């Protein structure tokens, strides 16, 4: 696979689509980042949103397999940076539709500088703001050998800029170790102080530390009032556009999830205070929501 870099992962995605004249329908999770949706629309692709799957919070595999024959691309997102190997699933998709293009979006995962092979046609990592390794910008892509990759000139007044970002691998390696250590320190606080019943499994706790609670709005309001911060990513696009379909699992995930910060900008003291506020709101009786609950 060919290593490419740019200032943003969306720039690599756009360049790849344009260089290979990819058209038609793209399958993508309904709760994907809005910037990715804008990039795909800018590239002229038709969007087919798919619900997530309850057991791994990524795009529904059964639905994708049923839709793959009519699609030209799948954009697979590793929700909250989950590192599970989905290669078998990718190979099943290729068996259904050999010509489908698979984009493996690992922008919330730890960057890998040595991807030599993958059943995906494009693998994406990001070192942008608030990602696993935050260099303030930048992205890494791996393009399968059979595909072209060209820098596309873009009007700087339009959605994507043409500024190039050069990957500083030494800086990346130095920051990776420090950021991993800091995340583990804050995650240890969250694991110890918060009820285990509301915590997502450890596989989802790399990018941020995620909990499920039916008191999400109350918790976010209290954290903001105390000068702290948390998020609730990502809202399904049913909240942004009007669709006739319902996406119950993605809607429930957004309804209940709180992403607690564990990056370099959040201190151990802030993490402790975050837990104290959450515990004071939860009280002794816990109601544990699930993404499949209506």
Image (cartoon, rainbow, N blue to C red):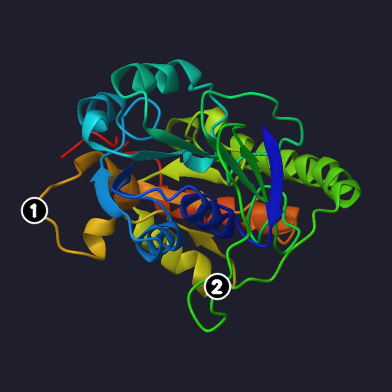
Q: Residues within 10 Å of mark 1 (few under 14, many from 20)?
A: few
Q: Nearer the viewer, residue 162 or 112?
A: 162
Residue at 48% in and 79% down: 158
Q: In this view, does 11 lie above or below 292?
A: below
Which SS class for mark 2? loop
Residue 198 placement (x, y as % from top left): 43, 37
- Note whether residue 48 is visible: yes
Residue nearest the observer in this picture, 40 or 267? 40
- In three-dimensional space, the C-alpha distance between marks 1 and 2, rounded to whole angstroms, equals 34 Å
Q: Nearer the viewer, residue 108 or 124?
A: 124
Of callouts 1 and 2, which one flags the residue occurring earlier in the amino acid sequence?
2
Residue designated by label 2: 154
x then y, percent, for residue 16: 53, 50
Residue 176: x percent and y percent? Answer: 80, 43
Nearest to viewer (mark 1 / mark 2): 2
Name which residue lies at 15% across and 40% down: 294
x and y percent of residue 111 in the render? 70, 40
| Pointer 1 residue | 244
């Amino acid at each position: 696979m060919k290593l490419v870099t740019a200032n943003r992962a969306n720039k690599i995605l756009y360049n790849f689509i344009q260089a290979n004249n990819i058209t038609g329908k793209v399958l993508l999770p309904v709760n994907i980042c809005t910037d990715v949706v804008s990039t795909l629309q800018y590239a002229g692709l038709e969007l087919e949103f798919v619900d997530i799957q309850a057991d791994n919070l990524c795009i529904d595999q059964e639905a994708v397999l049923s839709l793959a024959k009519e699609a030209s691309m799948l954009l697979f997102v590793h929700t909250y940076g989950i590192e599970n190997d989905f290669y078998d699933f990718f190979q099943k998709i290729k068996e259904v539709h050999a010509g489908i293009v698979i984009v493996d979006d690992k922008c919330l995962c730890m960057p890998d500088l040595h991807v030599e092979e993958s059943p995906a046609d494009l693998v994406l990592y990001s070192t942008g703001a608030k990602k696993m390794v935050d260099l303030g910008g930048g992205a890494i892509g791996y393009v399968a050998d059979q595909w072209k990759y060209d820098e596309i000139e873009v009007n700087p007044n339009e959605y994507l800029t043409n500024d190039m970002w050069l990957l500083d691998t030494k800086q990346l390696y130095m920051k990776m170790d420090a950021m991993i250590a800091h995340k583990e320190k804050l995650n240890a606080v969250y694991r110890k102080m918060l009820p285990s019943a509301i915590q997502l499994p450890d596989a989802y706790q790399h990018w941020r530390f995620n909990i499920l609670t039916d008191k999400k709005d109350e918790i976010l309001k209290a954290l903001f009032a105390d000068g702290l911060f948390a998020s609730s990513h990502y809202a399904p696009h049913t909240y942004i556009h009007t669709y006739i379909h319902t996406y119950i699992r993605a809607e429930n995930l957004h309804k209940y999830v709180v992403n607690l910060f564990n990056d370099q900008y959040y201190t151990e003291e802030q993490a402790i205070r975050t837990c104290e506020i959450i515990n004071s709101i939860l009280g002794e009786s816990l109601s544990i929501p699930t993404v499949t609950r209506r």
